[in-house]
Image (tube, grey):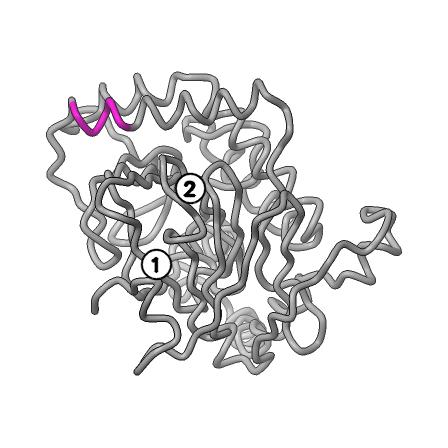
Amino acid sequence: MHPVRLKDIPGPGVDLRVVKWRDNKPLPILDKSGRIVALGAAQSEDPTFLAALLRIADLLEDARARGSFSEKDQGRGDFSILKWGFSHGGGRGSPMNLNLPGGKIFDLTEKVMSDPGFERLARQVSGAFAYWAPRLHAHYAEAKEAICKWDPELKHWLGCVFAAFVCNLGPQTICIEHQDPANLAYGWCCVTPLGNFDPTRGGHVILWNIGVAIECPALRHFFLPSASIVHSNVTVHPHETRLSVTHYTAGALFKFVERGMMLEKDFKRTASKKDLKASAEKDKGRWKFGLSLFSTMEELVSLGGLQKRPPVPAVVGDTSPPALLH
């Protein structure tokens, strides 16, 4: 697989249409039932916050220049990464911090993450999440709170419901077609692009299941169900830079909480037949439960979150479980 160029859209094997996102207004992406399944969140107009994001971009550029990275973002693209927060799954025996002492870039990562802009970004992202998907946000908050009580040593930002984030250091963070199966199947991750690129000519977020390539300027926030929708980016030009910060929570963390703070194998070994049956039934209805956590525009208006309905693009996805959820 190779990254898509803007001039290839549309074209053979690239059945996409471009969605412009040039004014600083929210861009909710709806399915056929009116659920907000993805979102372009409006950029903060606070100049101090924008300055903090520019500072983060400079820090990541410097980290790429100074670090000796053995870890690339395998399966997504050719760029180095820094991870922070906590996760589970992927061979981990229990939830644990991502940046462990003794690692080759432990000190560099901790120094970069000490900048207050990262916590400010995490809080901003979490606030937009709560505004546009309050039930899904609450689901994340409950799981994270339970795990952090179980292990107070886990690193996280208090004002953010996401458990972790990854900094994609570029210099051109362009993802090829992929899904993120380790993330919550019906959950959101949030991508904040950084760098110096023309968003009308490249850097678009492609949602292949929906058939759109959405302009995504630097310093904005794009939420999507990355475990379920195949996504990638449009290339940027050779002289441009594009980095990003992606907030996410591993799906295994939710399962860990659901299993009473134990691994799946331990749950199956110790659970009663009644509990095993109830768990199997819950798994059967998981896609329906996941869809129920997404909000609609009408619901948000009725809750008072939206004073008036913002412009909604004609972007419609398939509501069937294979298209949106595993």
Who comes first in sequence, dot 1 or dot 2? 2
Q: Position of residue 124 (x, y in %)?
A: 59, 33
Q: Residue at x 22, y 19 (%)?
A: 107
**Camera-side mark, 1 or 2:** 1
**Which dot marks residue 223?**
none
Q: Is residue 308 above or below residue 240?
A: below
- Label annotation for residue 193: 2
Residue topped by disc 1: 234
Residue at 25% across, 29% down: 100
Residue beneath the point at 22% across and 59% down: 75
**Which one is in front, 60 or 181?**
60
* Disc 1 residue crowd, few under 14, some 14–19, many 20+, Cα 10 Å: many
Provide the secondary structure element on which disc 1 rests: loop
Name the main secondary structure of what is drawn in magenta: helix
Location of residue 9 (image quadrant): bottom left
Instruction: Give the x, y percent position of residue 157.
Output: 51, 28
Look at label 1 and name its amino acid.
Answer: Val
Query: Could you say which is closer to the camera, residue 240 or residue 205?
Result: 240
Q: Which residues are magenta?
A: 61-65
Q: Is residue 44 left or right of residue 115?
A: right
Q: Foreground: 30 or 99?
A: 30
Quadrant where the N terminus sits is bottom left
Instruction: Tell me the CA gap for discs 1 and 2.
Output: 13 Å
Label 1–label 2 contact, CB within 8 A: no
Give the amino acid type for the residue marked by disc 2 in the picture: Pro
Instruction: Tell me the quarter of the picture where residue 251 sits.
Output: bottom left
Was residue 316 drawn as part of the magenta stretch in this picture? no
Q: Is residue 63 above or below residue 312?
A: above
In the displayed structure, does residue 310 sit left or right of residue 234?
right
